[in-house]
């Protein structure tokens, strides 16, 4: 199975709140899990990424939590700001000879002041 | 450094026509991947090229093809266009080492088939 399931489809958060987006996968051969942020009219931009040998990675207000046994990973956006309003995609990739990314279906985040 | 450049940004084509999209990767990147983005299907992998060779291919009909040149620039071609081919076509470039090499996306080409 090469699917990556992402939820929720949309998320509304108050400014200063925590935004949480979840993803799940089936294929244990995946070993690279990036998150991308996409604004309207733009291409996706890499936010943060993690490998299965690490349970958590933090970069500024963005944190990935990774649960290898549950085959789940999530993005936490702390102190959410209106400028974070965008669509977020989780993705997964294999370590062998490819950079192919398998994307989740996306989460549209709206942060209200 | 300059980012991934895709041309043209917008295209309107008629059913049955063919179209060629271009992607110039970041300098030094040898891998170019193409994705189709639609509201219904999300981001779907089309194909990946590394050093002028197709390294991986998604589940798209043979009407979708691509190639990569010696300078790593890539083109994708869609023949006999159908209404359902209307989408944002994105290319991403990376160093091509596989499994976790950061991929950088261009702004995409918005293709509308009428």
Image (spheres, helix red, strand yellow):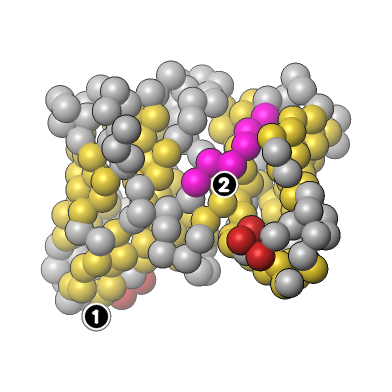
Is residue A49 inside the magenta stretch? yes
Residue A93 is left or right of residue A56, and the answer is left
User: Mark 2 belongs to which subunit?
Assistant: A
Q: Is residue B113 above or below residue A97?
A: below
For the residues labelled 2 and 1, the Cα–Cα distance comes to 31 Å
Q: Position of residue A90 (x, y in %)?
A: 63, 46
Is residue B96 inside the magenta stretch? no
How many labels were placed on the picture?
Answer: 2
Q: Is residue B33 visible?
A: no
For the point 61% across and 61% down, the residue is A83
Q: Which picture quadrant has residue A47?
A: top right
Magenta range is A45-50
Front residue of A82/A24: it is A82
Q: Position of residue A12 (x, y in %)?
A: 75, 70
What residue did someone put label 2 on? A36
Residue A1 is left or right of residue B69, and the answer is right
Q: Is residue B45 visible?
A: yes
Q: Position of residue A11 (x, y in %)?
A: 74, 67
Give residue B114's mark: 1
């Amino acid at each position: 199975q090469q699917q990556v399931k992402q939820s929720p489809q949309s998320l509304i958060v108050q400014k200063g709140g925590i935004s949480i987006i979840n993803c799940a996968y089936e294929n244990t051969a995946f070993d690279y899990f990036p998150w991308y942020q996409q604004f309207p009219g733009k291409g996706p931009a890499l936010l943060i990424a993690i490998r299965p040998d690490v349970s958590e990675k933090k970069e500024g207000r963005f944190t990935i939590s990774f649960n290898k046994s549950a085959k789940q990973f999530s993005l936490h956006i702390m102190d959410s700001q209106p400028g974070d309003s965008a669509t977020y995609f989780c993705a997964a990739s294999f370590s062998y000879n490819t950079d192919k990314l398998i994307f989740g279906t996306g989460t549209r985040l709206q942060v209200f002041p | 450094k300059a980012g991934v450049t895709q041309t043209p940004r917008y295209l309107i084509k008629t059913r049955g026509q063919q179209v060629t999209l271009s992607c110039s990767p970041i300098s030094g990147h040898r891998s170019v991947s193409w994705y189709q983005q639609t509201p219904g299907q999300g981001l779907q992998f089309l194909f990946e090229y590394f050093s002028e060779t197709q390294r991986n291919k998604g589940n798209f009909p043979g009407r979708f093809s691509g190639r990569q040149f010696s300078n790593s620039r890539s083109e994708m071609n869609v023949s006999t266009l159908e209404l359902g081919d209307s989408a944002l076509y994105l290319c991403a470039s990376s160093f091509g080492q596989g499994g976790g090499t950061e991929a950088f996306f261009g702004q995409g080409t918005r293709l509308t088939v009428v």
